[in-house]
Image (spheres, rainbow, N blue to C red):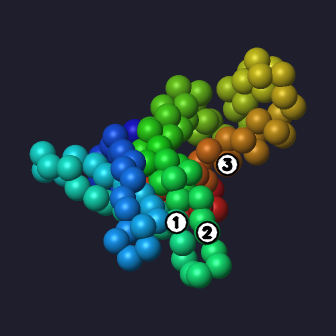
Amino acid sequence: MTKHKTTPGPWTVRKAKRPTDGEYDYAIGANVGGRAQCIAEAFGRCSENDILPAEANARLIAAAPAMRDALWALDASLDLSEGEGGMANEMWADVLSIDRETWIALCRQIRAALALADGGDTNV
């Protein structure tokens, strides 16, 4: 596992009513230095005509640390770093009943998602 440059999870979601129009935005919060802090917001409206799925967006954002940690654990436990010719690729493709090329593409997606989350090169 690498050291992450993000606010540690878990992150939470809280509904926040906007005083201007009474609609709801959502705050994504985390424990920062022993205090609950808003670290991001998901807005329900970005213009007069655009209604956004703010709650769903906020929940996806809040789930990011857990998903990142799960992908790092998967990467480590499956030894995805073995490369395209590694025995792990053959074995896991068989176990999951998928073809080798699909497995390798999935491994690349996992590595690219981790790189994106951790600010690295997404062309892995």
Crowding around mark 3 (Cα neighbors within 10 Å: few <14, some 14 to 19, many 20+) is some
Residue type for callout 3: Gln
Of the 4 image quadrants, the one containing the C terminus is bottom right
Instruction: Please tell me the numbered disc located at residue 44.
Output: 1
Marks 1/2: CA distance? 6 Å
Q: Quadrant of the N terminus?
A: top left
Q: Which mark is residue 23?
A: none
Q: Secondary structure at mark 3?
A: helix
**What is the secondary structure assignment of the residue under circle 2?**
loop
Question: Which amino acid, by three-letter code, is at mark 2?
Answer: Ile
Rendering quarter of residue 79: top right
Position of 42 relative to 64 (above/below): below
Question: Distance of mark 2 from mark 3, alpha carbons?
Answer: 30 Å
Residue 19 or residue 28, whichever sits in front? 19
The answer to whether mark 2 and mark 3 are in CB contact below 8 A is no
Instruction: Name the N-terminal-most of marks 1 and 2.
Output: 1
18 lies left or right of 46: left
Residue type for callout 1: Gly
Residue at image coords 51%, 53%: 55
| Relative depth, front residue between 81 and 112 | 112
Q: Earlier in the sequence, mark 2 or mark 3?
A: 2
Q: Do tag 1 and tag 3 residues touch (Cβ < 8 Å)?
A: no
Q: Residue furthest front?
A: 22
